[in-house]
Image (cartoon, rainbow, N blue to C red):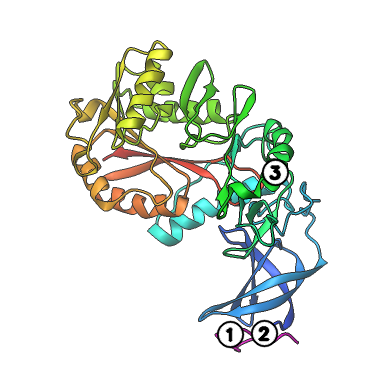
Amino acid sequence: MQRPPKKFVPHPFAYHQEIDVEIQSLTNLGSGVARVDGWVVFVPFSLPGETVRARVFRNDKNCSHADLVEVLKPSPERVEPGCPIFGDCGGCQYQHLSYDQQLAWKTRQVGELMKHMAGIEYPVNHCLSSEQVWNYRSKITPHFEKEKDGRIGPIGFLMNGRRSQLVDVPQCPIAMKEINAALPAIREDIRGNTHRYKRGATILLRATAEKVETNPKATAIEKVGDLTFQFLAGDFFQNNPFILPLFTGYVAKQAVAAGAKYLVDAYCGSGLFALTLAKHFEKVAGVEVSETSCEWARKNAKGNNITNAEFLTASAEAIFDVISFPAADSAVVIDPPRKGCTPEFLDQLIKFGPSRVVYVSCDPATQVRDLKQLSEGGYQLADVQPFDLFPHTRHLECVMTLVKV
């Protein structure tokens, strides 16, 4: 038997002990959850209802972690993965689960986070998706390490469960077809020119205007409905263009539901929500801490002939000081980064007091954390809608609508 790591805790299971367990549920990280005499064991790539053989590699204070060895009794929802390196590559967690059940579990997980993190029980709408569930990503960023003995090793993504080891990814079935068509030549060029790279690097592949851009400083173009957006290829923009009309349309529907005349987009970036929602409001103000992002938003407004939207740069400490709209007639859309909002920002939002807040998040856990503060500040949930922008992965976007009470 392999010698255990130095810090391995040998209880309740020995290192690499194999155990047969029944999987009861899934975590929001995509792992199966089993219990052995009340003790929790996490097993990636297993599904609820399955009996599996698992090999323990770590015991924590209140749970153990194990690798999947064999599926002894498969779930009827288990399907053949669409990628030959699924399970080795850490990019996807759900390719072995039927797509209908992926949506069902993502819906359930949002409700469980609300209940357990914020003590809020509220009905969650069924997770929505675009029809395109393969070849949907418009951007990928493979990595590689410094050459060794004159050769560059794997060019791809982190291996499942590893913090530094990479798995080679010659093709990615969730990336757009244009990206997969360009990938072989880019990989060949890297391996044929090792002298360019004195250390490891990350490559950008952004599908834009029927080509693939690798320069992060180049201008990328994305169409959302009738609108055209420009932004730096290396900057953030939603990476599933196929669902964006449905996604932004839903945010618009929620923002205008109570008849607000004015809209504030408090994390406006290059203007995605401010500009797709502008036709529903008398005036729109996009606010950003980055002047560069505001400049792109202004260019996009001008390019799409939108005249009722302005974009303002404000400090994070006083983001609503530049807004002159009456709060009672205003809706606010917020789409913060994965870490969510700061308590200081939420205090500013509550003090501003808009009639409606539409909170868009790529991490429901931080969103639910912030929901608790908004609830304590006088806002009440009116709608919870998950969106599956990232099929076959554990990631989702969630739109929560709150009204001032």
| Secondary element type, mark 3 | helix
Q: Amino acid at mark 1?
A: Phe
Q: CA distance from mark 2 to mark 3?
A: 38 Å
Look at the image and tell me whether residue 181 can be seen.
yes
Residue 187, numbered circle: 3
Q: CA distance from mark 3 to mark 1?
A: 38 Å
Circle 2 crowding by C-alpha within 10 Å: few under 14, some 14–19, many from 20: many
> Are circles 1 and 2 on residues that touch, CB within 8 Å?
yes
For the point 70% across and 61% down, the residue is 45
Q: CA distance from mark 1 to mark 2?
A: 8 Å
For the point 71% across and 82% down, the residue is 16
Q: Amino acid at mark 2?
A: Tyr
Q: Is residue 56 above or below residue 128?
A: below
Residue 229 lies left or right of residue 206; in this view the side is left
Magenta residues?
1-14
Quarter in which the N terminus is drawn: bottom right
Query: Is residue 362 found inside the magenta-colored segment of the image?
Result: no
Residue 316 position within the rendered picture, expressed as x and y whole percent measured from the top left: 24, 43
Q: Which residue is mark 1?
A: 8
